Amino acid sequence: MPNNANQSNTYQPETLAVHAGTVRSQFGEHSEALFLTSSFVFENAAQAAARFIGEQPGNIYSRFTNPTVTMFEERLAAMEGAEQCIATASGMSAILACVMGVLKAGDHVVASRSLFGATVNLFNNIIKKFGVETTYVSATDVAEWQAAVRPNTRLFFLETPSNPLTEISDIAAIAAVAKQCGALLAVDNCFCTPILQRPLGLGADIVIHSATKYIDGQGRVLGGAVLGSKKNMESVYGFLRTAGPTMSPFNAWVFLKGMETLKIRMDAHCANALELARWLEAQPNVARVFYPGLPSHPQHKLAMKQQKAGGGIVSFEVKGGKAAAWRVIDNTKLLSITANLGDTKTTITHPASTTHARITPEARAAAGITDGLIRIAVGLEAVVDIQNDLARGLA
Ligand SMILES: *Cc1c(COP(=O)(O)O)cnc(C)c1O
């Protein structure tokens, strides 16, 4: 922010979302500039040498740093209350950079059973090849986290609310267990964004983002971020600079613009989701609604303490299993049938046959993902239009 205003902790998150990180070039542009350049020119050989050995700060090459990407990093760091943010090419490369930076062969991870599918795949099929084992535990039962700890446990990993059942993990309680055994707690904050939840303030060590979702908010580009203390981020940045899954400057520029409307979009997503969840609860053909903002949610109290609002994701179970769920989905005209989320456009998906199709029916049942379950990522349309679109198939 100009005039060092981003040094201040006194601004509200929505103010930081608009101003933090902005650096103006010599032209004095008001909107953040897009620096589409792979490399940077030095004034002389001595300056090049000083930059390369790290004696003089400054840009060298966009795999290392880029001014537009740096503005994105500074802005998100200010919003999450983090010392440092490292931008990545996608949410998955943020998780990869985190584990490659923090873990080594022989280390052990304790992770929530309710993680994004590709994250589970990364732990089970990629990180495992390098000698890192993962134990999965309940998202909600803190005692299971404690019981899973081994002498070599280095990382706890969770996302809250979970997808698609919106289970809430108690970040402060799980952070306390992690601290006690010398492990770091990483929280994937994609569903809440810093507008609704700030995990570092609750004791987490690392925050992960898929900026692809709400931070962009309009379904245009992929990106991610890892945030934490300078100390914890050093090896994460080292991995990124060498291996190269860095954020494109163009995508960083899109995210900077997205963040400026994040507060009003999140408020609207949450208000729409709450209204839709209440309406769904009153429908005779709906067996159950999963939404943290409803008093019927098993962890409603914890959710309302930990988050500013219930978020934009609502799941519900229709009576009549898969046939009934598919009937609801196939009778929509306005809603997009896609697994993406965090868009202005409402999306609808059948987890059992899409995002969770590759796990066994037994494992699905154990996870509570029934054949009648539908997940909705509520967008910014009028709620009455979303209701009417669902009512046809629910009748
Ligand atoms: C989408 C998503 C990711 C992965 O992000 P990409 O940007 O698609 O790589 C990780 N975690 C959660 C919770 C997500 O929803």
Image (spheres, helix red, strand yellow):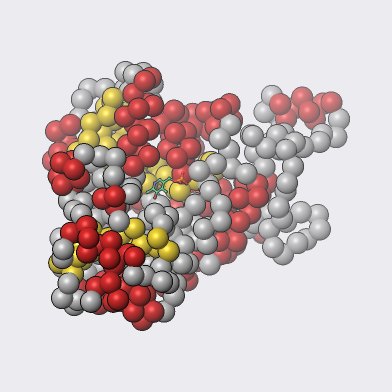
Residue, x 17% and y 72% (percent of image)?
Answer: 285
Residue 322 relative to residue 86: left or right:
left
Extreme residue toward the right, this view:
44
* Number of marks present in the image shown: 0
User: Which residue is at 25% across, 33% downward?
Assistant: 110
Q: Residue at x 72, y 48 (%)?
A: 35
Q: Judge by depth and name the residue closer to the eye, 251 or 304.
A: 251
Q: Quadrant of the N terminus?
A: bottom right
Q: Quadrant of the C terminus?
A: bottom left
Along the viewing direction, whichever of 142 and 219 lies nearer the viewer: 219
Looking at the image, can residue 67 be seen? yes
In the rendered image, the vertical position of residue 186 relative to residue 328, given as above or below? above
Residue 246 lies left or right of residue 213; in this view the side is right
Picture quadrant of residue 49: top right
Taking the image as drawn, is residue 271 in sight? no
Rendered location of residue 206, percent (x, y): 39, 41
Please report the residue visible at 56 percent of the width from the left and 64 percent of the height from the top.
260
Q: Nearer the viewer, residue 361 or 189?
A: 361
Q: Position of residue 23 (x, y in %)?
A: 68, 54
